[in-house]
Image: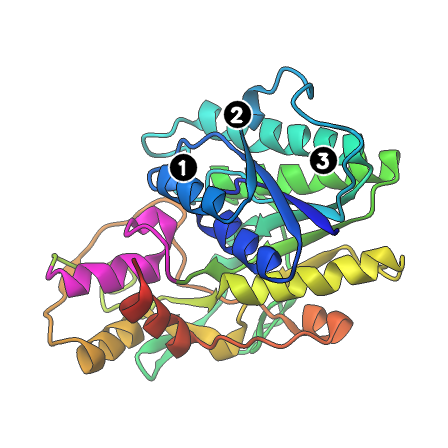
Amino acid sequence: MKRIFITGICGFLGSHLSYYFNSLGYKVYGADNLSRKGSEKNYKLLKKKGIKIYKIDLSNLKNLDFLKKNIKFTALIHCAALTSVMDGANNNSTEFIYKNNIISTLSSLKISNFFKTKFIFISSSRVYSISEIDKLKFKIANNKFKLKKTKLKGISQKGINENFSTTNPLSFYGSTKLICENIVQEYCLFNKIPYVINRCGLLSGKGQLYKNDQGIISYWINSWKKKKKLEYIDFGSKGYQVRDCLHPLDLGNLIKKQISFLNKNKLKVKIFNVSGGIESSFSLKELSTWCEKNLCFKKIGRRKKIRPFDLKWIVLDNFLVRKVFKWKVKFKKYQIFQDITFNND
């Protein structure tokens, strides 16, 4: 039987990947400290599926005695991390986010080495330089910021590619992800562990908590449904800022393909942008228009406020990952909006 190990298994992404690989016939194992709101609920649901979960804190792992070495795993997927770009500048201190994200990555690598299994690291689009993105020029078209032509390396009308600058500033969150990418590469090369790093865009779908630090789409739609106050903030306060989005099941399908490549030692490139791409990019104004059409009319407030690490536009170019793995995005942005609006628990 094929087995897979997922860290952060009770979180939004970890639980989705668990159900996905379980549906493919994998025996799924994982670890979680159950610290995030909603993780206890996911824990109970996953256990009902026969998924083995170790209640451990990877940022404070003393030893690997809880593991049985005679079990063989196809791969370890490392999802455990604080996920908000505001972490380190909010209630979660700078020290806490660095310790949590970096030490949990080291612990996950130790587990991977213990089992001699492949390593899949879930990184982020926020490893790309804020100052370089801020140099970009935009026009306003169709209620969104649209990129003008630029001579900067690593970017086109299709988005930011893997060659774009990763120099600081990145945000505290982004810098932990970039540090972890370097740790993963060094550790895996030294210990001869096959690995891949996925720099993911905005992961969104049903089952997310309705918090703004767990995905703007879920937060926006839920607030709309419950008639809570919403505001456009900064950049003219008109909701023109743009992100792309990706459903976790599309990521699961990609990881399945990546594991197959690693099994055959065919993977030369190790770092990929993984996103819905320019086709699944949207502005807050566009999301509001969709909500008006599918839910009800709502007036959106405006607030002039500069928040740390905010960006006008960040869209990932997913050309490389589509080319290498013959991967296609199934869930487009409007399908993701519908999934959250009508299928969320």
- Which mark is first along the chain, 1 or 2? 2
Mark 2 residue element: loop
* Residue type, mark 2 in image: Asp
Which residue is under mark 3? 183
In the rendering, at what x and y percent does residue 21 appear?
61, 57
* Residue type, mark 3 in image: Ile
| Residue that appears at 85% across and 40% down | 189
Q: Residues within 10 Å of mark 3 (few under 14, many from 20)?
A: some
Boundaries of the magenta span? 206-227
Residue 215 visible within the image: yes
- Placement of the C terminus among the 4 image quadrants: bottom left
**Quadrant location of residue 317?**
bottom right
Alpha carbon of mark 3 to alpha carbon of mark 2: how far? 19 Å
Which residue is under mark 1? 87
Q: Is residue 23 left or right of residue 242?
A: right
Q: Nearer the viewer, mark 2 or mark 1?
A: 2
* Residue type, mark 1 in image: Asp
Q: Which mark is residue 57?
A: 2
| Residue that appears at 49% across and 40% down | 173
Q: In this view, does 218 lie to the left or right of 171?
A: left
